[in-house]
Amino acid sequence: MFNLKQLFATAMLIALPMTATAKYDLIESQSKLVFVSIKKDSIGEVNEFKSLSGSIDKNGLATVEVDLTSVSTGIEIRDQRLQNHLFDTSKFSTAKVQTEVSLDALKELKVGESFHRHAPITLSLHGIEQQLIAHSDVYKLSENKILVISAKPVLVNANEFGLIAGVEKLKELAGLPSIATAIPVTFKLVFELD
């Protein structure tokens, strides 16, 4: 017997955009989170975090978690000092970034196209949550893969996250006259449709 209710339910499911149930997962091997530290007023060093995880859920909530124990400066003792005295990884082993992404805008992109985002992000670091602004470009690399890359660095101020005491300790341990407390951060994040 013909069931009008079942037919209507099936039609509604077909009409839903594919992104309504879509979830994107971060591809760690293709993603990077880089920060620049400046010491003695003029010596810059490029550093990164080696371990990232994240996703964009079916509602468009993007989350990236940073393993702070994976900080990599190229010098092991410096990595340990950052972990122990700046990030205090025994208590705060991860940092988390969250923002909203328009799944409809992603769906409308053709492969090779991009759009610019100027959006608030929430950074949770050292037990403190702050809102920052991120400028990024979103590229559709393939039908199931997107790239989110910083168009401008995000400035993270140590003072806003209770990290000044850690910076002072690093200065003391390294015998440095100064370490910058405003740190530019850039990112390249690749997500794949689950």
Image (cartoon, rainbow, N blue to C red):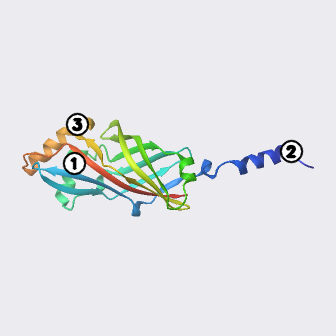
Residue shown at the point (80%, 45%) measured from the top left: 8
Residue shown at the point (43%, 46%) measured from the top left: 117
Quarter holding the C terminus? Answer: bottom right
Percent of width and height locating residue 37: 20, 51
Q: Which residue is mark 3?
A: 159
**The disc labelled 3 sits on which kind of residue?**
Asn
Percent of width and height locating residue 82: 21, 50
Q: Which residue is mark 1?
A: 84
Nearest-to-viewer mark from 3 and 1:
3
Q: CA distance from mark 2 to mark 3?
A: 62 Å
Q: CA distance from mark 2 to mark 1?
A: 65 Å
**The disc labelled 1 sits on which kind of residue?**
Asn
Percent of width and height locating residue 18: 63, 52
**Residue 187 picture quarter:** bottom left
In what element is the residue under mark 3?
helix
Q: Which residue is mark 2?
A: 4
In what element is the residue under mark 2?
helix
Nearest-to-viewer mark from 2 and 1:
2
Answer whether residue 144 is visible to the viewer in this image. Answer: yes
The tag earlier along the polypeptide, 2 or 3, is 2
Q: CA distance from mark 3 to mark 1?
A: 18 Å
**The disc labelled 2 sits on which kind of residue?**
Leu
